[in-house]
Image (tube, rainbow, N blue to C red):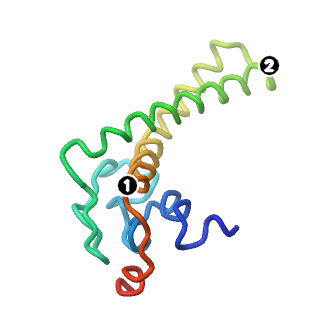
Amino acid sequence: MSFLKKGTKAYSIFNMKCPKCHEGDLFETGSFSFKKSFDMPEKCPHCGQKYFLGPGFYYGAMFISYGITGWFSLFFVGFLMLILGIHWQTAFVFLLFTMAILFVWFFRISRAIWINFNVKYDPRVAEQAK
């Protein structure tokens, strides 16, 4: 898939890599880790790109997370009710369990999207970072 190769925004977002060099990790632990779930380094260890561009920088990520979570919830409950024929109360219980597992990933993907809106990939910096 060409949209997921290095140098694209999708690569940086879904692999949660530095938006400038696509080498450094945005988070200190893996995507589904519940240990240090929300900890991010101050800057990229490869290129030095700051991950916190200003006070309250990730405030915008909250709105992205809200949108992703809302649409996911609608489609998830709709699928369970309309396609699988599950009662609405049971579908919401399944949604709660699913959201309990995915909340860290939604948080992280929202931050990855937000920083990628604001920082551009630079192939020269990526070459120097290797």
Q: Compared with residue 120, is residue 57 higher up or lower down, i.e. above or below? A: above
Q: Residue 78 in the image: state x and y as whole percent.
A: 70, 23
Q: Compared with residue 48, is residue 106 higher up or lower down, i.e. above or below? A: above
Q: Residue 80's image quarter?
A: top right
Q: Label 2 is placed on what type of residue?
A: Gly
Q: Compared with residue 56, is residue 3 higher up or lower down, i.e. above or below? A: below
Labels 1 & 2 near each other (Cβ < 8 A) = no
Decide if residue 31 is on the left or right side of residue 41: right
Label 2: which residue?
Answer: 85
Q: Residue furthest left?
A: 55
Q: Residue 115 in the image: state x and y as whole percent.
A: 38, 54
- Discs 1/2, front: 1
Q: Which mark is residue 7?
A: none
Depth check, front residue: 89 or 125: 125
Is label 1 in a helix, a strand or a loop? helix
Q: Residue 93's image quarter?
A: top right
Give neighbour class at mark 1: few <14, some 14-19, many 20+ (Cα, 10 Å): few
Label 1: which residue?
Answer: 118
For the point 37% across and 80% down, the residue is: 125
